[in-house]
Image (cartoon, rainbow, N blue to C red):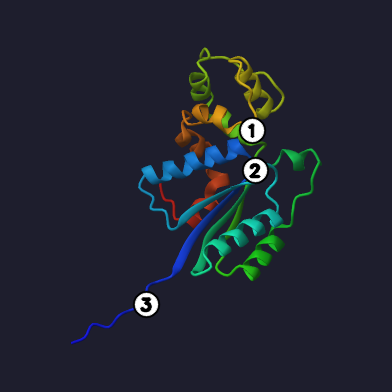
Amino acid sequence: MVAVKTKKDKRKNIIVICVEGDADELIFRHLLEYYQKEGWCCPGELKYHNANGFPSESEIRSKLNQIQRIYSNKTLFFHTVLCEYDTDVFEDGACHLPDWSKVRKSLERDFPYVNFCQIEVKTSIEDWMLDDLDGLLKALKLPMGTRPKGRTGQDKVKALFRKKNIVYDRHKGKTRIKPIIDKLDIAKIREARKKELREFEKLLGVNIG
């Protein structure tokens, strides 16, 4: 009997993580690594896009188009497309919040197989970092019990970094802040932000508890 040859499956599963800045990207990379260490099996290839600012619909479209060009010989399945952003610019009235339902429908229309979700980081990713204040103090080698000064989470994190003569730049400081963020207890941060992460984790099939 002659074996029947089957065509190689050319479908490519992609997970696109669009974030607002360097600190956001480092936190989400840390988070996805934590999921995997806890037994989660990633359902696709991870692609990160750092917008260095609010990741608008045009930014997201640009990234998806770029990926389509790279894998032009495959059928793409955008398993999950995430837009992560801080809420501070919207709370201050500097920008208007997009109509996410329209954005979702538009992306689903133009990019088949898109599962889109957004994560509002209140008020900024620095507030998430402060969910593990003890870990941040330890990473910066500051005394336990040090109380960060400032009005916002971003102000407080900058103040703590200044105590060690480290310039904290959330958009252009990846090499300086990575060693600090890598030492944070991401499980603790994730536990504090379960509500914000719920839809994202559901789409990815994360079931850690």
Instruction: Say few, some or many: other residues with alpha carbon within 10 Å of mark 2 (under 14 / 14 to 19 / 20 or more).
Output: many
Q: CA distance from mark 1 to mark 3?
A: 46 Å
Q: Amino acid at mark 3?
A: Lys
Instruction: Say which residue appears at 44% left-offset and 55% top-offset.
Output: 205
Please provide percent x and percent y for residue 43.
43, 58
The amino acid beneath tag 2 is Glu
In percent of width and height, residue 26 lies at: 53, 38
Q: Is residue 27 above or below residue 113?
A: above
**Does label 2 or label 1 sit earlier along the sequence?**
2
Give percent across and percent down for residue 137: 52, 19
Residue under the point 48% across and 39% down: 30
Residue furthest left in the image: 1
Which residue is the site of mark 1?
Answer: 170
Question: Does 107 sit above or below residue 91?
Answer: below
Instruction: Of the two numbered discs 3 and 2 on the same chain, state the one appearing first in sequence.
Output: 3
Dot 1, how many residues are within 10 Å of its Cα: few (below 14), some (14-19), or many (20+)? Answer: some
- Which disc is residue 20 wearing? 2
Q: Is residue 82 visible?
A: yes
Q: Earlier in the sequence, mark 1 or mark 3?
A: 3
